[in-house]
Image (spheres, helix red, strand yellow):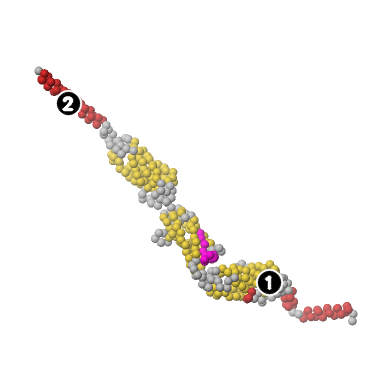
């Protein structure tokens, strides 16, 4: 038999044999086949505590006949249908080689969890070996949550927005997903306004904005956090500031003026509050009649300044009043101490003038007359003695 004839017969036999092999077996041998077993799932800590973040490492095998490309890995907790982390991708796993993928995970409460992993790749025809599972028991953590909060700004005006910023940790481990409730309380411990709720981010940080109370004073701001059955809190002080304007003294350039005199009335304006005041008017009254209004551009907290006006004196007793912010245009911590009234008595014009002068003149004439009489008497006595 010739060589060419023998080659033709061998080829025919090969075709017959190939025709007898199932198509799926041929496909498996010339396609990638990624696989994973329960033992391929490893934990960075086999005995973690609740809220403790660990790393889950997965080894993926390619037992097919071609390189596995775009290998995707999904991580699931218990029977949840949604992965607890975005899918991981392995670009390429050569034939008979392995690739690895990792994910961070934390058990929120103490119990036994099932960690499930699924893998797949392009052109993978065997899906029977693409999933694995491994259990992990999470223990009870020790110690409370550590909440660290700051207030920005620490002092503000009524109704102003302020921020409560902070972090939630278990020891030094950030606690993402921790529930945080921020509330404001007055000095008696009573709640002011509605508490604000937020959630800590991936690094355990939280931030929330609140509105300052309307009344001046110090308020307690509390951030309470809870996660995995654990609780913690931190507090800070918010100071709501307002000016408090009052008149402390009213004085006169002359305490006993006469009718028609120009009297300088000086009032001392003080800011007894915790915030500066700007564009403050001080009004001056004679009884209910206003005779002057003086503007003060600004007055810092705790400071005082004199404010003066001129008053034309009228006969009689008068009630002179100085009032700060008479139209209530400045928000203050107290509106009850803005005015002070002082009495003053004005004498009649000339009360110690012409009438007094006439009396003085009359008295002088009388003295002169007495002196003259005495002189005459003395002269007569001397004459009588001489005779």
Q: Is residue 327 left or right of residue 174?
A: left
Q: Is residue 366 in sight in this rendering?
A: yes
Q: Is residue 106 above or below residue 150?
A: below
Q: Earlier in the sequence, mark 2 or mark 1?
A: 1
Q: Nearer the viewer, residue 76 or 146?
A: 146
Q: Nearer the viewer, residue 78 or 384?
A: 384
Q: Residue furthest left?
A: 387
**Rendered location of residue 342, percent (x, y):** 32, 44
Residue 175 included in the magenta stretch of the image: yes
Q: Which residue is mark 2?
A: 370
**Mark 1, residues whose alpha carbon is within 10 Å: few (<14), some, or many (≥20)?**
some
Q: Is residue 117 left or right of residue 276?
A: right
Residue 155 circle label: none
State the residue at coordinates (26%, 30%): 354
Residues drawn in magenta: 165-177
**Rendered location of residue 166, percent (x, y):** 51, 60
Q: Residue furthest right?
A: 2
Q: Is residue 113 left or right of residue 192?
A: right
State the residue at coordinates (64%, 68%): 88
Q: Which residue is mark 1?
A: 98
**Rendered location of residue 229, percent (x, y):** 49, 70
Which quadrant of the rendered structure holds the C terminus? top left
Q: Is residue 210 left or right of residue 341?
A: right
**Mark 2, residues whose alpha carbon is within 10 Å: few (<14), some, or many (≥20)?**
few
State the residue at coordinates (23%, 29%): 360
Q: Is residue 32 in sight in this rendering?
A: no
Q: Is residue 58 above or below residue 277?
A: below
Residue 156 included in the magenta stretch of the image: no
């Amino acid at each position: 038999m010739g060589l060419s004839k023998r080659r033709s017969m061998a080829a025919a036999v090969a075709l017959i044999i190939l025709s007898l092999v199932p198509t799926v077996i041929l496909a498996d041998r010339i396609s990638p086949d990624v696989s994973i077993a329960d033992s391929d799932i490893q934990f960075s800590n086999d005995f973690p505590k609740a809220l403790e973040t660990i790393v889950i490492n997965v080894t993926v095998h390619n037992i097919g006949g071609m390189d596995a490309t775009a290998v995707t890995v999904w991580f699931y907790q218990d029977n949840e249908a949604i992965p607890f982390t975005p899918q991981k991708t392995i670009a390429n796993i050569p034939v008979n080689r392995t690739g690895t993928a990792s994910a961070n995970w934390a058990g929120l409460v103490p119990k036994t969890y099932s960690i499930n992993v699924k893998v797949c790749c392009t052109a993978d025809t065997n899906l029977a070996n693409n999933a694995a599972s491994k259990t992990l028991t999470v223990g009870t953590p020790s110690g409370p949550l550590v909440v660290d909060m700051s207030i920005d700004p620490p002092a503000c005006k009524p109704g102003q927005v302020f921020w409560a910023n902070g972090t939630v940790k278990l020891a030094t481990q950030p606690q993402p997903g921790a529930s945080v409730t921020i509330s404001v309380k007055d000095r008696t411990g009573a709640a002011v306004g509605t508490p604000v709720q937020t959630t800590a981010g991936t690094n355990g940080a939280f931030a929330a904005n609140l509105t300052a109370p309307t009344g001046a004073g110090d308020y307690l701001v509390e951030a309470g956090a809870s996660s995995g059955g654990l609780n913690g809190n931190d507090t800070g002080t918010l100071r709501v500031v307002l000016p408090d304007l009052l008149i402390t003294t009213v004085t006169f350039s002359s305490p006993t003026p006469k009718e028609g005199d120009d009297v300088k009335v000086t009032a001392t304006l003080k800011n007894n509050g915790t915030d500066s005041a700007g564009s403050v008017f001080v009004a001056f009254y004679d009884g209910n009649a206003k005779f002057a209004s003086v503007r003060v551009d600004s007055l810092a907290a705790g400071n005082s300044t004199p404010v003066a006006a001129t008053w034309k004196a009228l006969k009689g007793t008068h009630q002179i009043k100085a009032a700060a912010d008479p139209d209530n245009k400045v928000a203050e911590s107290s509106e009850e101490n803005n005015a002070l009234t002082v009495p003053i008595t004005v004498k009649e014009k000339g009360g110690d003038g012409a009438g007094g002068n006439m009396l003085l003149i009359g008295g002088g004439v009388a003295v002169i007359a007495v002196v003259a009489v005495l002189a005459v008497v003395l002269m007569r006595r001397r004459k009588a003695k001489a005779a």
